[in-house]
């Protein structure tokens, strides 16, 4: 039984082949719950049912966004410039 819980949309990587893909379905029947997940690997046309223990989650890179869609660093730089003008 896998200790890791997978959700649809999670990015995963096969532990042996290092192929990456995205979870498309999490089986919920009693026989398959927490045992198998369906993964669409990059470059493949069909999702495969794989043992949950044979893959691990891959973190996705996220850019910290400030209000207005700008990166947080740009927002901080603008704040610093406004502060310098008023001082």
Image: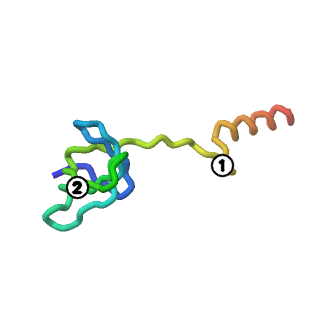
Q: Quadrant of residue 23?
A: bottom left
Kindly indicate whether the residue at mark 1 contacts the one at mark 2 (C-beta within 8 angstroms): no
Of the numbered discs in the image, which one, if any, rests on residue 83?
Answer: none
Percent x, y for residue 76?
A: 69, 37
As rendered, which of 51 and 33 lies closer to the eye? 51
Q: Position of residue 9 (x, y in %)?
A: 39, 55
82 over 69 or under it: above or below: above
Question: What residue is rendered at 65% in x and 49% in y?
Answer: 69
Measuring from the top left, give residue 51's x and y in whole percent: 19, 50
- Location of the C terminus by quadrant is top right
Rendered position, 5 above or below 59:
below
The answer to whether residue 55 is left or right of residue 85 is left
Question: First in sequence: mark 2 or mark 1?
Answer: 2
| Secondary element at image label 2 | strand
Q: Is residue 52 left or right of residue 70?
A: left
Against 80, residue 12 (above or below) is below
In three-dimensional space, the C-alpha distance between marks 2 and 1, rounded to whole angstroms, equals 37 Å
Label 2 crowd bin: few (<14), some (14–19), many (20+), radius 10 Å = some
Residue 86: x and y in percent read 86, 36
On residue 69, which mark appears?
A: 1
Q: Secondary structure at mark 1?
A: loop
- Is 74 or 25 nearer to us in this picture? 25
Mark 1 neighbour density, 10 Å: few (under 14) some (14–19) many (20 or more): few
Q: Which residue is mark 2?
A: 49
Mark 2 vs mark 1, foreground winner is: 2
Residue at the location (20% across, 57% down)?
34
The picture quadrant where one finds residue 8 is bottom left
What is the residue that sits farthest to the left in this orientation? 31
Between 50 and 26, the one lying in front of the other is 50
The quarter of the picture where residue 78 lies is top right
How many marks the image carries: the answer is 2
């Amino acid at each position: 039984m896998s200790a890791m819980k997978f959700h649809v949309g999670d990015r995963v990587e096969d532990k042996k082949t290092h192929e990456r893909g995205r979870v498309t379905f999490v089986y919920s029947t009693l026989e398959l719950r927490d045992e198998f997940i369906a993964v669409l690997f990059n470059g493949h046309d069909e999702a495969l049912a794989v043992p949950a223990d044979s893959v691990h989650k891959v973190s996705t890179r996220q850019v910290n966004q400030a209000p207005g869609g700008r990166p947080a660093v740009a927002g901080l730089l603008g704040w610093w410039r406004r502060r310098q003008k008023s001082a």
